[in-house]
Image: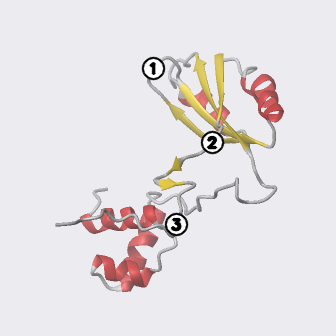
């Protein structure tokens, strides 16, 4: 189905701020609020919008810090289904937060979270590496998060980020 320009504008707005009220969205889009609510409902039904989530800085949430790893996975594609079948087996694990088909040296990029590095190592050695199609893995641990989904971490929110213009 073809998407309208207003739907694209709406998606860009809620991608930046998913909690923006329908009233504000309607004003920004110059549309009646009921039209905006209807567009949101339709986009959700069409699975264009899969959900709404918050971006959490877990280092500031006391006691809730998690270890995140990005795992490069080389696999043997299956006849008739390519990489889809093995990718599905991998993304069904509850530890997996994201799974992408990639170009380059490795076929899949898998993002997982655990409480400790040891927990992630156990996942890789006991669950991921034992899958029949998996040829090899390379695990990278995230050490510090600077920016995620356009949100900059460790930036002083009170600071004025406007460019200084002088004559």
Q: Is residue 160 above or below residue 77?
A: below
Label whose residue precedes the other's in the sequence (3 or 1): 1
- In the picture of the structure, the residue carrying the numbered disc 2 is 144
Q: Report, in whole angstroms, how far the alpha carbon at label 3 lies from the one at label 2.
A: 19 Å
Tell which tag, 2 or 1, sits nearer the viewer: 2
Placement of 55 over or under 111, stated as above or below: below
Which of disc 2 and disc 3 is earlier in sequence? 2
Q: Quadrant of residue 24?
A: bottom left
Question: Does 95 appear above or below 9?
Answer: above
Q: Quadrant of the N terminus?
A: bottom left
Q: Secondary structure at mark 3?
A: loop
| Local SS, label 1 | loop
Q: Is residue 35 visible?
A: no
* Mark count: 3
Image coordinates for residue 127, horizontal then vertical, percent:
77, 28
Query: Residue 27 in the image: x percent, y percent?
Result: 33, 83
Q: Nearer the viewer, residue 36 or 145?
A: 145
Alpha carbon separation for disc pair 2 and 1: 25 Å
Q: CA distance from mark 3 to mark 1?
A: 38 Å
Residue 104 bears which disc, if any?
1
Q: Earlier in the sequence, mark 2 or mark 1?
A: 1
Colour theme: secondary structure
Q: What residue lies at 51% left-to-right and 23% top-to-bottom?
A: 82
- Check disc 2: other Cα within 10 Å, few if <14, some if 14-19, many if 20+: few
Q: Quadrant of the C terminus?
A: bottom left
Tag 3–tag 2 contact (CB < 8 Å): no
Mark 3, mark 1: which one is toward the viewer?
A: 3
Side (left or right) of 48 relative to 92: left
Residue 157's disc is 3
Residue at 52% over, 26% down: 81
Specify the label residue 142 is tagged with: none
The image position of residue 59, as x and y in percent, is: 70, 53
């Amino acid at each position: 189905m073809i998407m309208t320009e207003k739907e694209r504008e709406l998606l860009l707005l809620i991608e930046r701020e998913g909690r923006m009220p329908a009233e504000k969205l309607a004003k920004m889009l110059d549309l009646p609020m009921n039209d905006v609510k209807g567009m949101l409902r339709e986009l959700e039904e069409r699975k264009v919008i899969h959900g709404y989530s918050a971006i959490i800085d877990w280092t500031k949430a006391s006691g809730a810090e998690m270890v995140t790893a990005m795992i490069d996975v080389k696999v043997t594609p299956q006849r008739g289904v390519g990489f889809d079948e093995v990718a599905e087996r991998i993304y069904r694990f509850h530890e997996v937060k994201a799974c992408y088909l990639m170009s380059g040296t490795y076929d899949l990029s898998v993002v997982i979270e655990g409480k400790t590095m040891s927990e992630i190592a156990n996942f890789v050695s006991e669950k991921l590496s034992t899958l029949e199609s998996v040829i090899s893995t390379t695990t990278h641990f995230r050490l510090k998060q600077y920016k995620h989904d356009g949100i900059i971490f460790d930036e002083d929110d009170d600071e004025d980020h406007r460019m200084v213009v002088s004559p």
